[in-house]
Image (spheres, grey):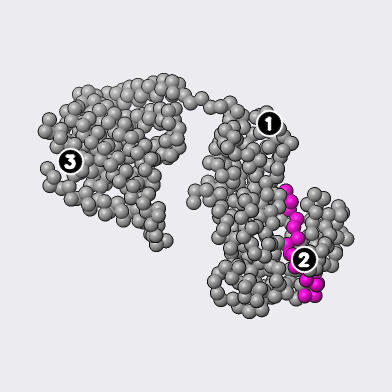
Amino acid sequence: MQEYFIIIISAVLINNIVLSQFLGICPFLGVSKKLSASLGMGAAVTFVLVLAGAITWAVQTYILNPFNIGYLQTVAFILVIAALVQFVEIVMKKYSPGLYKALGIYLPLITTNCAVLGVAILNIQKEFTLGKAVVYSLSNAIGFTLALVLMSGIRERLEDADIPESMQGIPIALVIAALMSMSFLGFTGLI
Amino acid sequence: MLVAVISLAAMGGIFGIILGISSKKFAVEIDPRVEALLNVMPGANCGACGQAGCAGFAESVVAGTIKANACAPGGKTLYEKIAEILGTEVSDYEERKVAQLLCQGGFGHAKMLYRYRGIPDCHAVLSAFKGPKACNYGCVRQGNCSRICPFGAIKMGADGLPVIDYYLCTGCNKCVLECPQSIIKLVGVSHLVNVRCINADKPKEAKAACSVACIKCRICEKNCPEDAVHVVPFRDGTVALIDYDKCTNCGICAAKCPTKAIDKISDLSEEVVIEMKEAVNSGCSKCEVCQ
Protein backbone atom coordinates (compact mmCIF):
# COMPACT_ATOMS: atom_id res chain seq x y z
CA MET A 1 0.00 0.00 0.00
CA GLN A 2 2.76 2.37 0.96
CA GLU A 3 4.45 1.74 -2.39
CA TYR A 4 1.35 2.84 -4.28
CA PHE A 5 1.08 5.95 -2.15
CA ILE A 6 4.67 6.85 -2.92
CA ILE A 7 4.06 6.32 -6.64
CA ILE A 8 1.04 8.64 -6.57
CA ILE A 9 2.74 11.44 -4.61
CA SER A 10 5.91 11.29 -6.66
CA ALA A 11 4.11 11.24 -10.01
CA VAL A 12 1.59 13.98 -9.22
CA LEU A 13 3.78 16.43 -7.36
CA ILE A 14 7.49 15.64 -7.26
CA ASN A 15 8.12 14.32 -10.75
CA ASN A 16 5.17 16.06 -12.36
CA ILE A 17 5.04 14.91 -15.95
CA VAL A 18 4.77 18.42 -17.40
CA LEU A 19 6.59 20.61 -14.92
CA SER A 20 9.48 18.34 -13.95
CA GLN A 21 9.85 15.87 -16.80
CA PHE A 22 8.84 18.34 -19.53
CA LEU A 23 6.65 15.89 -21.41
CA GLY A 24 3.38 16.96 -23.04
CA ILE A 25 4.28 20.63 -23.32
CA CYS A 26 2.26 21.13 -26.52
CA PRO A 27 -1.22 20.73 -25.00
CA PHE A 28 0.06 22.37 -21.81
CA LEU A 29 0.55 25.60 -23.78
CA GLY A 30 -2.11 25.01 -26.40
CA VAL A 31 -5.23 24.08 -24.42
CA SER A 32 -4.57 26.07 -21.26
CA LYS A 33 -6.44 29.21 -22.28
CA LYS A 34 -9.78 28.20 -20.82
CA LEU A 35 -10.44 26.30 -17.64
CA SER A 36 -13.28 24.23 -19.11
CA ALA A 37 -11.27 23.17 -22.16
CA SER A 38 -8.25 22.28 -20.02
CA LEU A 39 -10.43 20.12 -17.75
CA GLY A 40 -11.80 18.35 -20.82
CA MET A 41 -8.31 17.86 -22.21
CA GLY A 42 -7.19 16.54 -18.85
CA ALA A 43 -10.06 14.05 -18.83
CA ALA A 44 -9.29 12.91 -22.38
CA VAL A 45 -5.58 12.49 -21.61
CA THR A 46 -6.42 10.67 -18.36
CA PHE A 47 -8.62 8.21 -20.21
CA VAL A 48 -6.04 7.60 -22.94
CA LEU A 49 -3.11 7.44 -20.52
CA VAL A 50 -4.65 4.91 -18.14
CA LEU A 51 -5.93 2.64 -20.90
CA ALA A 52 -2.69 3.00 -22.86
CA GLY A 53 -0.68 2.26 -19.71
CA ALA A 54 -2.58 -0.97 -19.11
CA ILE A 55 -2.69 -2.13 -22.73
CA THR A 56 0.94 -1.29 -23.51
CA TRP A 57 1.95 -3.15 -20.36
CA ALA A 58 0.02 -6.19 -21.61
CA VAL A 59 1.49 -5.82 -25.10
CA GLN A 60 5.00 -5.65 -23.68
CA THR A 61 4.50 -8.60 -21.30
CA TYR A 62 2.50 -10.97 -23.48
CA ILE A 63 3.63 -10.10 -27.02
CA LEU A 64 6.96 -8.26 -27.15
CA ASN A 65 8.79 -10.10 -24.37
CA PRO A 66 7.83 -13.74 -25.20
CA PHE A 67 8.60 -13.28 -28.90
CA ASN A 68 11.76 -11.36 -28.06
CA ILE A 69 10.82 -8.41 -30.26
CA GLY A 70 11.40 -5.62 -27.71
CA TYR A 71 12.86 -3.43 -30.47
CA LEU A 72 9.30 -2.95 -31.76
CA GLN A 73 8.30 -1.26 -28.50
CA THR A 74 7.91 2.27 -29.88
CA VAL A 75 5.99 1.17 -32.98
CA ALA A 76 3.66 -1.12 -31.06
CA PHE A 77 3.01 1.48 -28.33
CA ILE A 78 2.25 4.22 -30.83
CA LEU A 79 -0.16 1.83 -32.55
CA VAL A 80 -1.99 1.24 -29.28
CA ILE A 81 -2.10 4.94 -28.41
CA ALA A 82 -3.25 6.00 -31.88
CA ALA A 83 -6.09 3.47 -31.83
CA LEU A 84 -7.14 4.62 -28.34
CA VAL A 85 -7.13 8.29 -29.31
CA GLN A 86 -9.23 7.50 -32.36
CA PHE A 87 -11.65 5.69 -30.10
CA VAL A 88 -11.84 8.62 -27.67
CA GLU A 89 -12.43 10.96 -30.59
CA ILE A 90 -15.34 8.91 -31.92
CA VAL A 91 -16.97 8.66 -28.50
CA MET A 92 -16.43 12.33 -27.68
CA LYS A 93 -17.88 13.46 -31.00
CA LYS A 94 -21.01 11.54 -30.13
CA TYR A 95 -21.49 12.49 -26.51
CA SER A 96 -19.75 15.85 -26.10
CA PRO A 97 -19.59 17.80 -29.37
CA GLY A 98 -18.87 21.03 -27.48
CA LEU A 99 -15.77 19.59 -25.88
CA TYR A 100 -14.85 18.02 -29.21
CA LYS A 101 -14.87 21.47 -30.82
CA ALA A 102 -13.05 23.11 -27.91
CA LEU A 103 -10.19 20.63 -28.02
CA GLY A 104 -9.96 20.87 -31.80
CA ILE A 105 -6.64 19.79 -33.22
CA TYR A 106 -5.23 18.93 -29.79
CA LEU A 107 -7.42 15.87 -29.50
CA PRO A 108 -5.82 13.93 -32.40
CA LEU A 109 -2.51 15.35 -31.21
CA ILE A 110 -2.77 13.25 -28.03
CA THR A 111 -1.58 10.50 -30.38
CA THR A 112 1.81 12.11 -30.51
CA ASN A 113 1.62 13.51 -27.00
CA CYS A 114 4.97 12.46 -25.60
CA ALA A 115 3.46 12.32 -22.11
CA VAL A 116 1.40 9.28 -23.13
CA LEU A 117 4.22 7.42 -24.86
CA GLY A 118 6.64 8.55 -22.16
CA VAL A 119 4.54 7.12 -19.33
CA ALA A 120 3.96 3.89 -21.26
CA ILE A 121 7.71 3.44 -21.71
CA LEU A 122 8.49 4.50 -18.13
CA ASN A 123 6.07 1.81 -16.92
CA ILE A 124 8.21 -0.81 -18.65
CA GLN A 125 11.54 0.72 -17.66
CA LYS A 126 10.58 0.83 -13.99
CA GLU A 127 9.52 -2.84 -14.25
CA PHE A 128 6.13 -2.21 -12.68
CA THR A 129 3.45 -4.86 -12.17
CA LEU A 130 0.12 -4.26 -13.94
CA GLY A 131 -1.42 -2.70 -10.82
CA LYS A 132 1.50 -0.34 -10.30
CA ALA A 133 1.59 0.52 -14.00
CA VAL A 134 -2.07 1.54 -13.93
CA VAL A 135 -1.63 3.56 -10.74
CA TYR A 136 1.49 5.23 -12.14
CA SER A 137 -0.34 6.10 -15.39
CA LEU A 138 -3.33 7.43 -13.50
CA SER A 139 -1.25 9.58 -11.17
CA ASN A 140 0.75 10.95 -14.07
CA ALA A 141 -2.51 11.80 -15.82
CA ILE A 142 -3.69 13.55 -12.65
CA GLY A 143 -0.39 15.43 -12.55
CA PHE A 144 -0.88 16.46 -16.17
CA THR A 145 -4.44 17.64 -15.49
CA LEU A 146 -3.30 19.48 -12.37
CA ALA A 147 -0.60 21.36 -14.27
CA LEU A 148 -3.03 22.15 -17.09
CA VAL A 149 -5.77 23.39 -14.75
CA LEU A 150 -3.37 25.52 -12.69
CA MET A 151 -1.96 27.00 -15.88
CA SER A 152 -5.39 27.79 -17.33
CA GLY A 153 -6.49 29.34 -14.04
CA ILE A 154 -3.51 31.68 -14.15
CA ARG A 155 -4.00 32.42 -17.83
CA GLU A 156 -7.66 33.26 -17.32
CA ARG A 157 -6.61 35.81 -14.69
CA LEU A 158 -3.97 37.14 -17.09
CA GLU A 159 -6.74 38.09 -19.52
CA ASP A 160 -7.43 41.11 -17.31
CA ALA A 161 -3.79 41.91 -16.62
CA ASP A 162 -1.97 44.74 -18.35
CA ILE A 163 0.80 42.87 -20.15
CA PRO A 164 3.31 44.64 -22.44
CA GLU A 165 2.39 43.97 -26.04
CA SER A 166 5.55 42.07 -26.85
CA MET A 167 4.93 39.69 -23.94
CA GLN A 168 1.29 38.89 -24.69
CA GLY A 169 0.26 35.35 -25.54
CA ILE A 170 2.88 32.62 -25.69
CA PRO A 171 5.84 34.61 -24.20
CA ILE A 172 4.07 35.28 -20.91
CA ALA A 173 2.74 31.70 -20.92
CA LEU A 174 6.29 30.40 -21.13
CA VAL A 175 7.40 32.67 -18.28
CA ILE A 176 4.53 31.33 -16.17
CA ALA A 177 5.40 27.75 -17.10
CA ALA A 178 8.97 28.36 -15.94
CA LEU A 179 7.81 29.88 -12.64
CA MET A 180 5.40 26.98 -12.06
CA SER A 181 8.13 24.50 -12.84
CA MET A 182 10.43 26.17 -10.31
CA SER A 183 7.72 26.25 -7.66
CA PHE A 184 7.08 22.53 -8.16
CA LEU A 185 10.74 22.00 -7.31
CA GLY A 186 9.64 22.82 -3.79
CA PHE A 187 7.99 19.40 -3.55
CA THR A 188 11.37 17.69 -3.80
CA GLY A 189 12.11 16.03 -0.48
CA LEU A 190 8.44 15.45 0.26
CA ILE A 191 9.19 11.74 0.38
CA MET B 1 11.22 -11.26 -38.34
CA LEU B 2 8.10 -13.18 -39.29
CA VAL B 3 6.90 -13.06 -35.69
CA ALA B 4 7.33 -9.29 -35.60
CA VAL B 5 5.35 -8.83 -38.80
CA ILE B 6 2.57 -11.18 -37.73
CA SER B 7 2.21 -9.80 -34.21
CA LEU B 8 2.12 -6.18 -35.34
CA ALA B 9 -0.31 -7.00 -38.15
CA ALA B 10 -2.53 -8.88 -35.70
CA MET B 11 -2.55 -5.93 -33.28
CA GLY B 12 -3.34 -3.53 -36.09
CA GLY B 13 -6.12 -5.78 -37.30
CA ILE B 14 -7.73 -6.09 -33.87
CA PHE B 15 -7.60 -2.34 -33.26
CA GLY B 16 -9.02 -1.75 -36.73
CA ILE B 17 -11.97 -4.04 -36.08
CA ILE B 18 -12.69 -2.39 -32.71
CA LEU B 19 -12.53 1.09 -34.23
CA GLY B 20 -14.70 0.02 -37.15
CA ILE B 21 -17.40 -1.30 -34.85
CA SER B 22 -17.28 1.70 -32.53
CA SER B 23 -17.47 4.20 -35.40
CA LYS B 24 -20.69 2.51 -36.53
CA LYS B 25 -22.06 2.31 -33.02
CA PHE B 26 -21.21 5.88 -32.03
CA ALA B 27 -22.01 7.42 -35.43
CA VAL B 28 -23.23 11.00 -35.14
CA GLU B 29 -26.47 11.70 -36.96
CA ILE B 30 -26.30 14.84 -39.06
CA ASP B 31 -29.43 16.79 -39.89
CA PRO B 32 -30.07 16.05 -43.60
CA ARG B 33 -30.87 19.73 -44.12
CA VAL B 34 -27.37 20.67 -42.95
CA GLU B 35 -25.89 18.33 -45.51
CA ALA B 36 -28.17 19.66 -48.24
CA LEU B 37 -27.13 23.20 -47.32
CA LEU B 38 -23.47 22.27 -47.40
CA ASN B 39 -23.88 21.11 -50.99
CA VAL B 40 -25.16 24.50 -52.14
CA MET B 41 -22.72 26.62 -50.08
CA PRO B 42 -19.84 28.32 -51.92
CA GLY B 43 -17.44 26.19 -49.88
CA ALA B 44 -14.83 28.91 -49.55
CA ASN B 45 -14.91 28.64 -45.74
CA CYS B 46 -14.18 32.37 -45.63
CA GLY B 47 -15.78 32.94 -42.24
CA ALA B 48 -17.21 36.29 -43.38
CA CYS B 49 -20.54 35.33 -41.82
CA GLY B 50 -18.85 35.03 -38.44
CA GLN B 51 -19.24 31.25 -38.28
CA ALA B 52 -16.54 28.61 -38.40
CA GLY B 53 -16.64 27.99 -42.13
CA CYS B 54 -19.51 26.94 -44.36
CA ALA B 55 -20.36 23.94 -42.17
CA GLY B 56 -20.76 26.24 -39.17
CA PHE B 57 -22.98 28.54 -41.22
CA ALA B 58 -25.16 25.66 -42.40
CA GLU B 59 -25.62 24.43 -38.83
CA SER B 60 -26.45 27.91 -37.54
CA VAL B 61 -28.95 28.55 -40.32
CA VAL B 62 -30.75 25.30 -39.56
CA ALA B 63 -30.67 26.13 -35.85
CA GLY B 64 -32.02 29.59 -36.67
CA THR B 65 -29.25 31.52 -34.91
CA ILE B 66 -28.09 33.31 -38.05
CA LYS B 67 -29.95 34.91 -40.95
CA ALA B 68 -29.85 33.04 -44.24
CA ASN B 69 -28.64 36.16 -46.07
CA ALA B 70 -25.47 36.44 -43.99
CA CYS B 71 -23.41 34.66 -46.66
CA ALA B 72 -21.92 37.44 -48.80
CA PRO B 73 -20.24 35.24 -51.43
CA GLY B 74 -23.47 33.28 -51.93
CA GLY B 75 -25.64 36.35 -52.40
CA LYS B 76 -29.22 36.13 -53.57
CA THR B 77 -28.83 32.87 -55.51
CA LEU B 78 -27.69 31.07 -52.40
CA TYR B 79 -30.43 32.70 -50.35
CA GLU B 80 -33.06 31.31 -52.70
CA LYS B 81 -31.54 27.84 -52.54
CA ILE B 82 -31.43 27.98 -48.74
CA ALA B 83 -35.05 29.12 -48.65
CA GLU B 84 -35.96 26.21 -50.90
CA ILE B 85 -34.22 23.68 -48.66
CA LEU B 86 -35.59 25.10 -45.43
CA GLY B 87 -39.00 25.83 -46.93
CA THR B 88 -39.02 29.50 -45.88
CA GLU B 89 -40.11 32.62 -47.75
CA VAL B 90 -37.82 33.91 -50.49
CA SER B 91 -39.23 37.41 -50.75
CA ASP B 92 -37.68 38.90 -47.61
CA TYR B 93 -34.16 38.92 -49.02
CA GLU B 94 -32.21 41.87 -47.82
CA GLU B 95 -28.93 42.60 -49.46
CA ARG B 96 -25.87 42.63 -47.26
CA LYS B 97 -24.58 46.15 -46.80
CA VAL B 98 -21.02 47.29 -46.38
CA ALA B 99 -19.57 50.63 -45.36
CA GLN B 100 -18.30 52.90 -48.13
CA LEU B 101 -16.10 55.93 -47.49
CA LEU B 102 -17.33 58.94 -49.44
CA CYS B 103 -14.00 60.75 -49.56
CA GLN B 104 -10.87 60.21 -51.60
CA GLY B 105 -8.94 63.21 -50.28
CA GLY B 106 -5.82 61.41 -49.16
CA PHE B 107 -2.29 62.78 -48.96
CA GLY B 108 -1.46 64.57 -52.21
CA HIS B 109 -5.09 65.13 -53.18
CA ALA B 110 -6.49 67.33 -50.45
CA LYS B 111 -5.01 70.74 -49.78
CA MET B 112 -3.87 71.20 -46.20
CA LEU B 113 -4.08 74.51 -44.32
CA TYR B 114 -1.91 73.61 -41.35
CA ARG B 115 -0.29 70.64 -39.68
CA TYR B 116 -2.28 69.10 -36.83
CA ARG B 117 -0.37 67.83 -33.85
CA GLY B 118 -2.77 66.94 -31.11
CA ILE B 119 -4.99 64.21 -29.80
CA PRO B 120 -5.41 61.67 -32.60
CA ASP B 121 -9.19 61.83 -32.60
CA CYS B 122 -11.55 63.00 -35.34
CA HIS B 123 -13.67 65.12 -32.98
CA ALA B 124 -10.58 66.80 -31.51
CA VAL B 125 -9.21 67.67 -34.96
CA LEU B 126 -12.50 69.20 -36.03
CA SER B 127 -12.56 71.46 -32.98
CA ALA B 128 -9.38 73.10 -34.32
CA PHE B 129 -10.62 75.35 -37.16
CA LYS B 130 -12.74 72.51 -38.63
CA GLY B 131 -9.68 70.40 -39.26
CA PRO B 132 -6.42 70.93 -41.18
CA LYS B 133 -7.97 70.23 -44.59
CA ALA B 134 -9.10 73.05 -46.82
CA CYS B 135 -12.19 70.92 -47.50
CA ASN B 136 -14.58 71.01 -44.59
CA TYR B 137 -16.57 67.97 -45.71
CA GLY B 138 -13.92 65.26 -46.09
CA CYS B 139 -12.21 62.70 -43.94
CA VAL B 140 -9.91 64.14 -41.24
CA ARG B 141 -7.89 60.90 -41.16
CA GLN B 142 -7.67 60.34 -37.41
CA GLY B 143 -9.16 56.85 -37.62
CA ASN B 144 -12.05 56.93 -35.15
CA CYS B 145 -13.90 54.57 -37.49
CA SER B 146 -11.01 52.14 -37.54
CA ARG B 147 -10.86 52.12 -33.74
CA ILE B 148 -14.59 51.66 -33.22
CA CYS B 149 -14.99 48.86 -35.78
CA PRO B 150 -15.63 45.68 -33.75
CA PHE B 151 -14.62 43.46 -36.66
CA GLY B 152 -11.26 45.01 -37.58
CA ALA B 153 -12.65 45.75 -41.04
CA ILE B 154 -11.33 49.31 -41.21
CA LYS B 155 -7.60 49.95 -41.44
CA MET B 156 -5.92 53.27 -42.02
CA GLY B 157 -4.36 53.18 -45.49
CA ALA B 158 -1.10 54.63 -46.79
CA ASP B 159 -2.84 57.78 -48.04
CA GLY B 160 -4.16 58.47 -44.54
CA LEU B 161 -7.72 57.47 -45.36
CA PRO B 162 -9.51 54.51 -43.83
CA VAL B 163 -9.64 51.43 -46.06
CA ILE B 164 -12.70 49.25 -45.58
CA ASP B 165 -12.33 45.52 -45.94
CA TYR B 166 -15.62 44.44 -47.51
CA TYR B 167 -15.08 40.82 -46.50
CA LEU B 168 -14.85 41.68 -42.82
CA CYS B 169 -17.44 44.46 -42.79
CA THR B 170 -20.77 43.30 -41.43
CA GLY B 171 -22.65 46.54 -42.01
CA CYS B 172 -23.15 47.09 -38.28
CA ASN B 173 -23.42 50.88 -38.74
CA LYS B 174 -21.03 51.70 -35.86
CA CYS B 175 -18.55 53.64 -38.02
CA VAL B 176 -21.40 55.50 -39.71
CA LEU B 177 -22.62 56.76 -36.33
CA GLU B 178 -19.08 57.48 -35.12
CA CYS B 179 -17.86 59.52 -38.09
CA PRO B 180 -18.24 63.23 -37.20
CA GLN B 181 -18.10 64.18 -40.90
CA SER B 182 -20.81 61.66 -41.86
CA ILE B 183 -18.84 60.46 -44.84
CA ILE B 184 -19.31 56.74 -44.26
CA LYS B 185 -22.44 55.27 -45.76
CA LEU B 186 -23.84 51.75 -45.85
CA VAL B 187 -24.27 50.61 -49.43
CA GLY B 188 -25.50 47.25 -50.68
CA VAL B 189 -22.75 44.96 -51.91
CA SER B 190 -24.15 44.86 -55.44
CA HIS B 191 -23.80 48.64 -55.86
CA LEU B 192 -20.35 49.26 -57.24
CA VAL B 193 -20.45 52.90 -58.35
CA ASN B 194 -20.27 55.61 -55.71
CA VAL B 195 -19.78 59.37 -55.76
CA ARG B 196 -16.89 59.58 -53.34
CA CYS B 197 -17.23 63.23 -52.48
CA ILE B 198 -19.81 65.21 -50.53
CA ASN B 199 -18.20 68.63 -50.89
CA ALA B 200 -21.15 70.96 -51.47
CA ASP B 201 -19.02 74.07 -52.00
CA LYS B 202 -18.95 75.95 -55.29
CA PRO B 203 -16.94 74.21 -58.04
CA LYS B 204 -13.98 76.58 -57.83
CA GLU B 205 -13.64 76.29 -54.06
CA ALA B 206 -14.11 72.55 -54.15
CA LYS B 207 -11.48 72.12 -56.86
CA ALA B 208 -9.05 74.34 -54.97
CA ALA B 209 -9.49 72.32 -51.79
CA CYS B 210 -9.11 68.87 -53.28
CA SER B 211 -8.13 67.42 -56.65
CA VAL B 212 -10.71 64.63 -56.45
CA ALA B 213 -13.67 66.80 -55.42
CA CYS B 214 -17.07 66.85 -57.11
CA ILE B 215 -17.14 70.06 -59.19
CA LYS B 216 -20.82 69.82 -60.08
CA CYS B 217 -20.06 69.82 -63.81
CA ARG B 218 -23.04 67.53 -64.50
CA ILE B 219 -21.05 65.49 -67.03
CA CYS B 220 -22.16 62.36 -65.17
CA GLU B 221 -25.77 63.49 -65.33
CA LYS B 222 -25.57 64.04 -69.10
CA ASN B 223 -23.85 60.74 -69.80
CA CYS B 224 -25.86 58.44 -67.58
CA PRO B 225 -28.01 56.16 -69.79
CA GLU B 226 -30.31 55.30 -66.88
CA ASP B 227 -30.89 58.81 -65.54
CA ALA B 228 -29.54 57.54 -62.23
CA VAL B 229 -27.08 60.26 -61.23
CA HIS B 230 -28.01 63.86 -60.51
CA VAL B 231 -26.44 66.89 -58.95
CA VAL B 232 -28.78 67.49 -56.03
CA PRO B 233 -29.02 70.10 -53.29
CA PHE B 234 -26.95 69.10 -50.28
CA ARG B 235 -26.36 71.11 -47.11
CA ASP B 236 -25.53 74.67 -48.33
CA GLY B 237 -24.79 73.74 -51.93
CA THR B 238 -25.06 70.86 -54.36
CA VAL B 239 -23.29 67.57 -54.99
CA ALA B 240 -23.68 64.61 -57.37
CA LEU B 241 -25.67 61.69 -55.99
CA ILE B 242 -26.43 58.27 -57.45
CA ASP B 243 -29.88 56.75 -57.22
CA TYR B 244 -28.99 53.15 -56.38
CA ASP B 245 -32.40 51.89 -57.48
CA LYS B 246 -31.70 53.01 -61.05
CA CYS B 247 -27.94 52.50 -61.27
CA THR B 248 -26.89 49.48 -63.35
CA ASN B 249 -23.18 49.60 -62.48
CA CYS B 250 -22.28 50.49 -66.09
CA GLY B 251 -19.53 52.80 -64.85
CA ILE B 252 -19.90 55.42 -67.62
CA CYS B 253 -20.13 58.24 -65.05
CA ALA B 254 -16.99 57.00 -63.31
CA ALA B 255 -15.14 56.96 -66.63
CA LYS B 256 -16.38 60.41 -67.68
CA CYS B 257 -15.95 62.20 -64.32
CA PRO B 258 -13.17 64.79 -64.92
CA THR B 259 -11.96 64.75 -61.30
CA LYS B 260 -12.50 61.02 -60.74
CA ALA B 261 -14.78 61.82 -57.82
CA ILE B 262 -17.02 58.98 -59.01
CA ASP B 263 -15.43 55.62 -58.48
CA LYS B 264 -16.37 52.14 -59.57
CA ILE B 265 -15.09 49.20 -57.54
CA SER B 266 -14.72 45.78 -59.09
CA ASP B 267 -17.62 43.36 -58.72
CA LEU B 268 -17.65 42.53 -55.06
CA SER B 269 -19.42 39.26 -54.60
CA GLU B 270 -17.68 37.65 -57.56
CA GLU B 271 -14.35 38.98 -56.41
CA VAL B 272 -14.97 37.70 -52.92
CA VAL B 273 -15.68 34.22 -54.23
CA ILE B 274 -12.70 34.13 -56.59
CA GLU B 275 -10.27 35.64 -54.11
CA MET B 276 -11.38 33.29 -51.42
CA LYS B 277 -11.11 30.25 -53.62
CA GLU B 278 -7.53 31.23 -54.44
CA ALA B 279 -6.83 31.99 -50.82
CA VAL B 280 -8.30 28.68 -49.69
CA ASN B 281 -6.08 26.87 -52.16
CA SER B 282 -3.07 28.67 -50.74
CA GLY B 283 -4.12 27.67 -47.22
CA CYS B 284 -5.45 30.93 -45.77
CA SER B 285 -8.67 32.74 -46.54
CA LYS B 286 -7.42 36.05 -45.08
CA CYS B 287 -10.60 36.25 -43.04
CA GLU B 288 -8.54 36.87 -39.88
CA VAL B 289 -10.96 34.87 -37.78
CA CYS B 290 -7.94 33.11 -36.31
CA GLN B 291 -6.65 36.38 -34.90
> On residue B88, which mark appears?
1
Residue A58, percent from left and from top: 24, 25
> On residue B128, which mark appears?
none
User: Label 3 neighbourhood size at 10 Å, few (<14), some (14-19), many (20+)?
Assistant: many
- Residue type at mark 3: give it: Ser
- Residue type at mark 1: give it: Thr
Does residue B15 lie above or below B290 as drawn? above
- Residue type at mark 2: give it: Arg
Q: Residue at x 31, y 31 (%)?
A: A47
Q: How many marks?
A: 3
Query: Looking at the picture, do discs 2 and 1 lie on one chain?
Result: yes
The residue carrying mark 2 is: B235
Q: Quadrant of the C terminus of chain A?
A: top left
Residue B257, percent from left and from top: 80, 64
User: How far apart are the alpha carbons under marks 1 and 3?
Assistant: 62 Å
For mark 1, name the chain. B
Query: SS for tag 3?
Result: helix
Give the mark nearer the N terminus: 2 vs 1. Answer: 1
Q: Residue at x 20, y 40 (%)?
A: A11
